[in-house]
Image (spheres, helix red, strand yellow):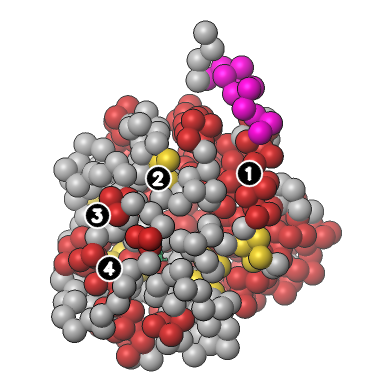
């Protein structure tokens, strides 16, 4: 009998899944941008779109660049690349552009999302520098302005870790990482609204109503202060240092610096040096010795999250290593991989707050797996990187291209025919990519 780790295990389904992944990218592609999935997410989402660009780069490099360019139509004058770019008002989603009340010429939301773009732009460029040179030259200043926005608008004086001021900014909406800070947000007086997400997905897989009231209240707070991001970070009702964005930005800074060198942008190289110089301070701030992992930290109270989120393992991807700390982190990762047959769970399966089906409180996400494994591989943890890749492959083979997966049973959850899952399949998880250098 073939086992999960034999090539023969996958042969039967291989061709169909590659074909289906391409179809999903094409079906969800609306001209120059791509929907995460129809119905549930009918617009362009920031980090979704960048993983989609990575997927497209396997089949159509020109279309991959277009995806990145279209995202930056939603970049504000202050540099922020918004988390949602609304092209038109869709009745299947709430909250739409009117609720956000932004003033940018293309309607957008008022917060950002994990900045994977520079890393993916570097991947695209290195695939074909000749094709990418002009496009990179135009995108580069936009990427610089966005990173600068994070390093100025989302850092509280003296700190270096990046804050999120809305759980949606982290991309990990209902992670237990936000529980304490979100509980302190008073939802009184929130404008009555009707959730649309529950018309698409089982409520047991989505955030609760109590969380939604606070999400909307935070949107109203930002809108009412005219999206003054410096004020929101300094004094708003919610500010938590996020290991996800902090590590993703560190990595993206390094990749942006490599791009600056390709373009001979010397002053940009120096500016990025000043960002990178502070990365160790950020990592020290996030390390939680009680749980042996990097963890979110409420910037209003200094309180650490008490559970392990999968994004805490992105330190390698970020380029952060410290031998004694890493030994502890590796032990934590081994424990979690052992507990979850379809790893990596977004939250520690041995923690009381773990919920195997509820969005970011337990399920496994292909995109996070890709980032974690990429970092682990770069630092020589090949066995774990390979385990994570094969788990991603198996869960997609067993369940299809779902938004996320139960880490214990492998069952698909959330939206189906999901573009970023298809993209990660094409770029990394499919047997077709075996032997490719990432
Ligand atoms: C949603 O609407 O669920 C999104 O995660 C917000 O970005």
Q: Please tell me whether residue 8 belongs to the stretch shown in magenta.
A: yes
Spatial CA span between label 4 and label 1:
32 Å
Per the image, the residue denoted by label 2 is 413
The answer to whether one can see residue 72 in this image is yes
Spatial CA span between label 3 and label 1:
31 Å
Query: Relative to residue 11, is residue 208 depicted above or below?
Result: below
Per the image, the residue denoted by label 1 is 21
Q: Earlier in the sequence, mark 4 or mark 2?
A: 4
Count of all numbered marks drawn on residues in the image: 4
Per the image, the residue denoted by label 4 is 212
Which quadrant holds residue 343? top left
Spatial CA span between label 4 and label 2:
19 Å
Q: Whole-percent x and y of residue 292?
A: 25, 42
Disc 2: residue Cβ within 8 A of ligand 1's nearest atom: no
Q: Please tell me whether residue 73 belongs to the stretch shown in magenta.
A: no
Q: Earlier in the sequence, mark 4 or mark 3?
A: 3
Which quadrant holds residue 224? bottom left
Per the image, the residue denoted by label 3 is 176
- Indicate which quadrant contains ligand 1: bottom left
Which portion, as a residue range, is magenta?
5-16
Q: Earlier in the sequence, mark 2 or mark 1?
A: 1
Looking at the figure, which quarter contains the C terminus?
top right
The answer to whether residue 338 is left or right of residue 269 is: left
Element assignment for label 4: helix
Q: Are marks 3 and 1 in contact (CB under 8 Å)?
A: no
Query: Residue 8 versus residue 157: which sits nearer the camera?
Result: 8
The answer to whether residue 224 is left or right of residue 11 is: left
Query: Relative to residue 166, is residue 353 depicted above or below?
Result: above
Query: Residue 161 versus residue 194: which sits nearer the camera?
Result: 194
Element assignment for label 3: helix
């Amino acid at each position: 009998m073939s086992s999960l780790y034999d090539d023969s295990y996958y042969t039967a389904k291989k061709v169909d899944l590659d074909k289906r992944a391409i179809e999903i990218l094409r079906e969800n592609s609306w001209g120059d941008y791509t929907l995460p999935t129809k119905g549930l997410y009918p617009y362009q989402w920031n980090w979704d779109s960048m993983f989609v660009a990575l997927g497209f780069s396997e089949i159509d490099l020109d279309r991959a660049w277009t995806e990145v360019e279209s995202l930056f139509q939603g970049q504000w004058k202050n540099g922020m690349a918004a988390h949602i770019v609304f092209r038109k008002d869709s009745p299947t989603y709430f909250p739409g552009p009117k609720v956000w009340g932004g003033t940018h010429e293309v309607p957008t939301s008022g917060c950002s999302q994990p900045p994977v773009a520079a890393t993916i732009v570097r991947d695209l460029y290195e695939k074909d520098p000749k094709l990418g040179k002009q496009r990179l030259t135009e995108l580069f200043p936009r990427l610089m302005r966005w990173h600068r926005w994070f390093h100025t608008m989302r850092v509280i004086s003296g700190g270096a870790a990046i804050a999120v001021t809305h759980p949606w900014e982290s991309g990990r909406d209902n992670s237990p990482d936000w529980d304490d800070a979100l509980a302190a947000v008073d939802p009184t007086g929130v404008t009555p609204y009707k959730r649309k997400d529950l018309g698409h997905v089982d409520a047991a897989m989505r955030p609760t109503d109590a969380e939604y009231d606070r999400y909307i209240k935070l949107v109203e707070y930002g809108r009412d202060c005219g999206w003054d991001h410096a004020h929101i970070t300094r004094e708003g009702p919610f500010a938590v240092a996020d290991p996800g964005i902090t590590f993703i930005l560190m990595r993206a800074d390094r990749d942006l610096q490599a791009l600056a060198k390709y373009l001979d942008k010397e002053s940009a190289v120096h500016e990025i040096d000043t960002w990178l110089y502070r990365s160790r301070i950020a990592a020290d701030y996030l390390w939680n010795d009680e749980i042996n992992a990097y963890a979110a930290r409420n910037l209003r109270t200094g309180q650490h999250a008490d559970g392990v989120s999968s994004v805490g393992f992105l330190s390698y991807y970020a380029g952060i290593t410290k031998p004694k700390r890493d030994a502890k982190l590796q032990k934590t990762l081994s424990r979690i991989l052992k507990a979850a047959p379809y790893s990596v769970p977004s939250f520690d399966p041995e923690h009381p707050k773990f919920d195997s089906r509820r969005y970011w409180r337990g399920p496994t996400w292909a995109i996070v797996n890709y980032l974690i494994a990429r970092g682990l591989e770069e630092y020589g943890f090949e066995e774990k990187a390979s385990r994570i890749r094969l788990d991603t492959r198996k869960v997609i083979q067993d369940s299809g291209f779902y938004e996320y997966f139960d880490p214990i049973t492998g069952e698909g959850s959330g939206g189906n025919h999901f573009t970023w899952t298809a993209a990660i399949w094409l770029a990394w998880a499919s047997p077709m990519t075996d032997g490719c250098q990432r």
